[in-house]
Image: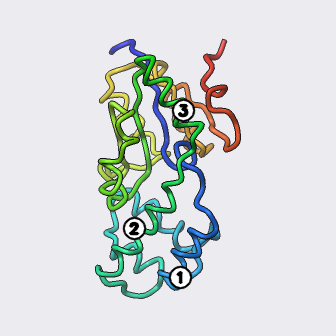
Amino acid sequence: MGNTQWYLFDYGMVITDAPTPEDWLNLEDAAGVPLMDPGSPYWQHRLEFDAGRYTSVEYWSRVTGREVPESRTDLLDTLDANQWSHFNLDTLDVLEELSGQGARLALLSNMPAPMVSRFEQASWTGYFQRRYFSSKLSLVKPQREIFEHVLRDLAVEPGMVTFVDDNPANVAAAQDVGLDARLHQPGIDLQRELVPRS
């Protein structure tokens, strides 16, 4: 196993900020049901969508409680991707700095296939030498197996990976595998969170 340091970043709420209320209203208007609440069908079925076990038609039909035609899901997928596209400029500055220093950067995101296809050629993906998406792996955080897959692919010991995520469950799971996992809290300076621990 290699001894090269890697920085592994989550996407939503680390590289991006939260969707705005206007974003949610636009998506709710298109879907015809309330979605913003943490207990809404949007979130109840999300991990299955992220894992690639639902198509867009299956996911949005479950979210709305009625059959949604494929012609409609393209709009819903687009609005969904748009609301997760408000970049955290402080994080982008950190990625730029790390990249300029020659650091090895990777991405690990729970992300459904339609969103992956929209983002794969986006300019921000150029920071990352490796990109891991749940829908392509049929695994989701916080499953232990997704972190084990990343480690095998990077061919490094767990302690050589600094992982940054906003979800405490994902951070705890990564720590259980041995990664140097840091909880990113919105509004906290990411640069400070990445300072090596003594």
Q: For marks 2 and 3, give the one nearer the viewer.
A: 3
Amino acid of disc 3 = Asp
| Residue toward you, 101 or 145 | 101
Report x, y in % for residue 180: 55, 25
**Closer to the N terminus: mark 2 or mark 3?**
2
Q: Residue at x 43, y 20 (%)?
A: 103
Q: Which residue was labeled with disc 3? A: 93
Give the image's coloring scheme.
Answer: rainbow
Q: Residue at x 33, y 15 (%)?
A: 1
Left or right of 149: which side holds 34?
right
**Closer to the N terminus: mark 1 or mark 3?**
1
87 up-or-down from 157: above or below: below
Q: For marks 1 and 3, give the one nearer the viewer.
A: 3
Q: Residue at x 60, y 37 (%)?
A: 90
**Closer to the N terminus: mark 2 or mark 1?**
1
Q: Which residue was labeled with disc 1? A: 29
Residue with the most extreme right position: 187
Report x, y in % for residue 22: 61, 70
Report x, y in % for residue 27: 51, 74
Left or right of 40: which side holds 144?
left
Tell me which corner region of the image, top left, top right, bottom left or bottom right, holds residue 197: top right
Dot 3 alpha-carbon crowd within 10 angstroms: few under 14, some 14 to 19, many 20 or more: few
Amino acid of disc 1 = Asp
Dot 2 alpha-carbon crowd within 10 angstroms: few under 14, some 14 to 19, many 20 or more: some
- Dot 2 falls on a residue whose secondary structure is helix
Q: How many marks?
A: 3
5 up-or-down from 91: above or below: above
Q: Which label is found at residue 78?
A: 2
In space, the residues marked 2 and 1 are separated at their CA atoms by 14 Å
- Dot 1 falls on a residue whose secondary structure is helix
117 up-or-down from 31: above or below: above
Amino acid of disc 2 = Thr
